[in-house]
Image (cartoon, helix red, strand yellow):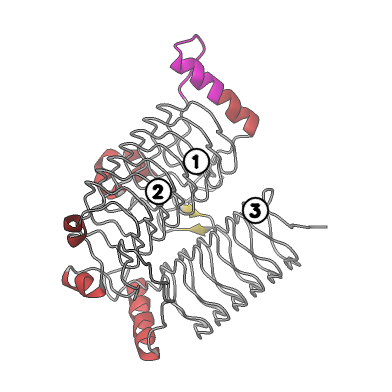
Amino acid sequence: MSADPNHVAPRVRLTQAQLDRACERHLAYLSGMQGGAKLSLPFFDLSGLSFNARNLTNANLSGAILRGTRFVGAKLDYADMFGCDLTGADLSNAQLTRTDLRAASLRGAVLRGAKMVECDLRDGNMAVSTRADFKVLGLDIGPADISSAVMIDADLTRARLTGSCAREADFSGATLAGAQLARVDLRNAQFKATNLDGADLVDADLRGADLSGAKVSAQALQTAIRTDEEALRRGVNVVSDLPPPVVPAAVVPESVPNSPPPPERLDAMLRAHAQWVATGGQGGHQLDISGLDLSHADLAGRVLTLMKAVGVNLRGADLRGAQMQAAQLSGADLRSTNLGFADLRGASMDRANLIDANLEKANLSKLLTARGHELRTSLVRARLAAAVLRGADLSEVDFTGADLTETVLEGANLEGATIEAARGISLG
């Protein structure tokens, strides 16, 4: 066996049958029956499995990989889900009263009708001293990520989201009465007919948010960030160039696509990002092009490692040979984009549109960080119809729910890739 100190053992993977037995023992534990045992599966890989309608009260799923996992109608009250990866998971009508979801990723997750009263979705950095398990494993603890999550009609009464990221999340018809939303990134989020009565919106970034029909006081809105000018005054990133929020009104104006920055400004942003990467964050600035229109841009060979590009329009762009490790590209428009030979290890491209894209000989294998943390590339629910992945390294890529109709996979390495739940796949 390797003695490499940076090596991280593979996540333990259960079958559905094994998981069902563990859930039955947990139910017996909750009922005080003999032979019962608390469900404790921290850091396990349970992606794509089903917990539908299960009673998981007080279960321990901290740090678990739960991508595309189904929790429809499940009861997760008081569960420890700190730092877990719920990207693309289905928690429709689930019950999560006082559930600990700090530092968790819920990107693209569906929580329609979920009961999340007093749920904890705060920035996980507040718990660094109390999560020795994460520190020992070298796992990063950061803000909870609810970007692009569907929370329509969910009950988030008195929920705590302070410092988290909920960009483009859909809270339409939800109840956020008394919720703590201070310093939450809510850019381009949907709050149509949402109850925000008594919510704390101090320094909440509402640029581009749609508040039409929402129940929210003018006083609360005054404490939030709604324009780039307000963001500048409060020292918040203004790179996004998002439009002002749509406030409650009889007539809601149509949204205007974000215009691209001038070439000289884009070049300055790219150079600052390259410096940020080279200095480990000590200099320069992290690139955030989320929501921008950069269609047909020439970004070949650029350093885009760890960039934020949620919902960006890169249709027809030239990204050949670009360094895009761990880039955040959820919901991005990458149609007809040239990503040949690009390094996309550990990138998140959930729900991205890659129709007719060229990823020939691109590297989408897992990324091993300096701390030994393994980060899989994610293409959950991405659209890859007619995309060319000839000779690409797709080992351990998560294709859960992705559309691979007529995708060219000749010579591609699919070892360990999650393709069972993908559509249109043909490896004959």
Residue depth check, mark 1 versus mark 3: number of the one nearer the observer:
1
Residue 103 image offset from top left, x and y in percent = 35, 48
Kind of element beneath mark 2: loop
Label 1 vs 3, first from the N-terminus? 1
Say what amino acid the circle numbered 3 marks.
Ala
- Gap in angstroms between the C-alphas marked 1 and 3: 24 Å
* Disc 2: which residue: 173
| Residue shown at 33% from the left, 34% from the top | 98
Relative placement, left or right, of 77 versus 404 is: left
Kind of element beneath mark 1: loop
Residue 26 image offset from top left, x and y in percent = 49, 21
Label 3 vs 2, first from the N-terminus? 2
* Disc 3: which residue: 417
Residue depth check, mark 3 versus mark 2: number of the one nearer the observer:
2
Are discs 1 and 3 less than 8 Å apart at CB? no
Residue 352 image offset from top left, x and y in percent = 55, 64
Asked if residue 336 is among those painted magenta in the image, a careful observer would answer no
Segment tinted magenta in the rendering: 23-38
* Disc 1: which residue: 91
**Residue that sits furthest to the bottom in the current view:** 264
On-image quarter of the C terminus = bottom right
Relative placement, left or right, of 93 versus 19 is: left
| Residue shown at 32% from the left, 54% from the top | 214
Nearest the camera: 400 or 361?
400
Relative placement, left or right, of 131 versus 96 is: left
